[in-house]
Image (cartoon, rainbow, N blue to C red):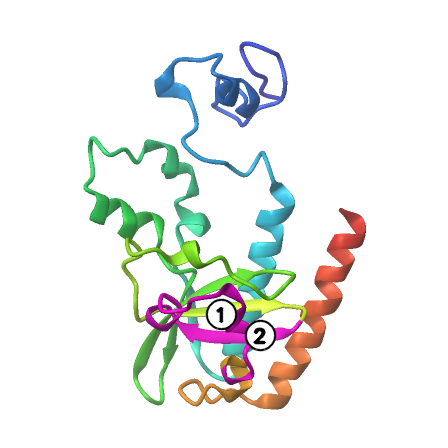
Amino acid sequence: MNTCNICNRYTRPNTDYCLACRKDGNVSVSNRYSKEYFEERPVNFVKGHIGEALIQNLFSCQGFVVLKYGMENNLSFLSEYLTKDDFSKIELAAIRNRPDLMVLNPDKRKLYLIEVKYTASGHIKLEEFDKEYPYDNCYLLAISKTGFRCVKVKEFKKFKRKEAIIKDKYKLELNEEFGLDKGLIGLFQNNAKSIYKAISDLN
């Protein structure tokens, strides 16, 4: 088991200092984390990955080709090496904000980018997609107790209130571009409720 050189707590393999010591400023600036990493809130990461898996399977069942594209899927360990000294703001935004999924409709020969967000309330913070977010044509797919909602990021950026996303017109089953089976969406929504309730009970 790998332990921190300062406090002897567990830390990631090949990592000299734990998250707590980095955040407390007990190490040099170059070794501090610039943001929260998976050690701090693992359950939230699990919820996010479950959401991605649900949406991936929902589209796959309908004949779409789905590829995991988000940075956290295969590049998460690189986050701490991305610095403003080496990359421009535009480059950093493009790398860090890569949407979770690339979804191909082989019949229409169209490719979609999808960002999946789990939120118990159904609301998504407006600052989640600020002006620096470069993927305006990406679809935001929100999973919550109220069901699945879907809206393009460029439309989401125009929202005045976070509650706007729970409007009925954004229900995934009403999205004509994807044309997903409404019954199957309902089945996945019910499964999502059961899964997330079970996680909440354990947490």
How far apart are the two marked residues, 1 and 2, measured between alpha carbons? 7 Å
Residue at the disc numbered 2: 148
Q: In the picture, residue 112 is in which quadrant?
A: bottom left
Residue at image coords 74%, 54%: 199
- Confirm whether residue 56 shows in the render: no
Q: Is residue 116 left or right of residue 83?
A: right
Residue at image coords 35%, 53%: 97
Residue 14 percent location from the top left of the image:
47, 23
Q: Is residue 116 left or right of residue 156?
A: right
What segment carries the magenta color?
Answer: 146-169
Q: Are marks 1 and 2 in contact (CB under 8 Å)?
A: yes
Q: Which mark is residue 118?
A: none
In the image, residue 103 sits, relative to residue 110, either above or below, namely above
Three-letter amino acid code of the residue under disc 1: Leu
Residue at image coords 60%, 66%: 122
Residue 75 percent location from the top left of the image:
39, 45
Element marked by disc 2: strand
Question: Magenta span has 153?
Answer: yes
Instruction: Tell me which numbered mark, 1 or 2, is placed earlier along the sequence.
Output: 1
Q: Is residue 61 left or right of residue 99?
A: right
Residue at the disc numbered 1: 141
